[in-house]
Image (spheres, rainbow, N blue to C red):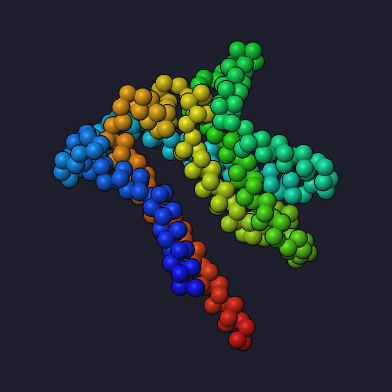
């Protein structure tokens, strides 16, 4: 048993080292005083200072946050409403057909989505005379399109886990359908909604290919800007930016896990207190 535990620890340590060693190297060299990616010339905050002075990167970061937040909120609203609608379907064939359509944006290669959305926007402008230009609007529409299925797939399992009689009980106790939904159903499926929102935000911020096709030169997102910079040479400013993003994501994950653990402890205490009484 002791030998098996040793093998398990070695295996887990190897996997973690394989995953996080590149990130560790990136973080270390973000503090390197020179542009060299192999020679350490001294500890410095030079690239962090230059990063915040780079107007192109800061503007792209602002675009990314604006698009990501708006698209995630809209995708969460649409995805939650769609999940409730799919769950309410009585016809299994129709429900299966809708679910297959929902999977398509996830299974399709991103380049197919990017080209098709670009053609749609061009067609809408030239043939349907819709006053739309490539920019923030098209980016938000595109991001809502590919983020919504992730919300649907996170909310649906929570709806299936929910007791169907709870909604009807709320109606019997005097709530109207609107009150029953927001006071009973939404709290029950809130973990799925939050998870869907975070996934949508992550995929929106991370997206490159679709954003490349539907953005303009003046409204590029951060991944598109970094992609164009990498063609020439990887600047140490990118190391600094990646380090900041990694630290922010790590802090958010720690906070979410801590809050979740505290809520679980509180609920366990309530259960124990109730059973004791």
Up/down of 212 relative to 273, above or below: above
Residue 125 quadrant: top right
Residue 38 screen position, x and y as percent: 24, 38
Residue depicted at 51% across the width and 48% down the height: 198
Residue at the image point whose x is 60% and y is 12% from the top: 126
User: Which residue lies most toward the front here?
Assistant: 3
* Front in this rendered view, residue 40 or 11: 11
Image coordinates for residue 183, horizontal then vertical, percent: 65, 59
Rendering coords of residue 215 (x, y %):
48, 24
- Nearest the viewer among 65 and 36 is 36
**Residue found at x 48% / y 68%:** 4
Residue in front for this viewpoint, 41 or 240:
41
Q: Say whether residue 135 is visible.
A: no
Considering every residue shown, the one lying at the far top of the view is 126
Rendered residue at 45%/63% (across/down): 7
Residue 241 is situated, as x and y percent measured from the top left of the image, at 32, 39
Which residue occupies the foreground of this view, 123 or 228? 228
Q: Quadrant of residue 6?
A: bottom left
Using residue 95 as the reference point, say whether residue 13 is left or right of it: left
The extreme left residue here reads 42
Say if residue 173 shows up in the picture: yes
Residue 221, above or below 174: above
Instruction: Decide: is 270 above or below 188.
Output: below
Left or right of residue 10, residue 106 in this image: right
Q: Quadrant of the C terminus?
A: bottom right
Side of 205 relative to 145 (left or right): left
């Amino acid at each position: 048993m002791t030998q098996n535990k040793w093998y398990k620890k070695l295996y887990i340590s190897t996997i973690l080292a394989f995953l996080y060693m590149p990130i560790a190297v990136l973080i270390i060299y973000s503090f390197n005083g020179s542009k060299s990616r192999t020679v350490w010339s001294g500890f410095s905050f030079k690239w962090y200072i230059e990063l915040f002075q780079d107007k192109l990167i800061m503007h792209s970061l602002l675009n990314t946050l604006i698009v990501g937040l708006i698209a995630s909120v809209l995708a969460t609203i649409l995805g939650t409403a769609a999940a409730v609608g799919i769950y309410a379907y009585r016809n299994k064939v129709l429900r299966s057909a809708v679910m297959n359509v929902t999977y398509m944006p996830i299974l399709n290669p991103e380049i197919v989505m990017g080209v098709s959305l670009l053609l749609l926007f061009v067609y809408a402008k030239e043939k349907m005379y819709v006053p739309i230009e490539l920019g923030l609007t098209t980016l938000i529409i595109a991001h809502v399109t590919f983020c919504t299925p992730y919300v649907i797939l996170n909310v649906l399992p929570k709806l299936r886990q929910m007791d169907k009689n709870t909604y009807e009980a709320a109606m019997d106790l005097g709530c109207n359908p609107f009150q029953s939904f927001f006071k009973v159903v939404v709290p029950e499926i809130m973990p799925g909604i939050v998870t869907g929102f975070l996934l949508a935000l992550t995929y929106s911020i991370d997206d490159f290919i679709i954003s490349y096709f539907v953005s303009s030169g003046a409204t590029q997102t951060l991944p598109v800007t970094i992609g164009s910079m990498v063609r020439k040479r990887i600047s140490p400013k990118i190391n600094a930016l990646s380090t900041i993003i990694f630290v922010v994501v790590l802090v958010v994950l720690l906070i979410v896990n801590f809050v979740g653990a505290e809520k679980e402890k509180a609920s366990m205490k309530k259960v124990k207190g109730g059973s004791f009484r």
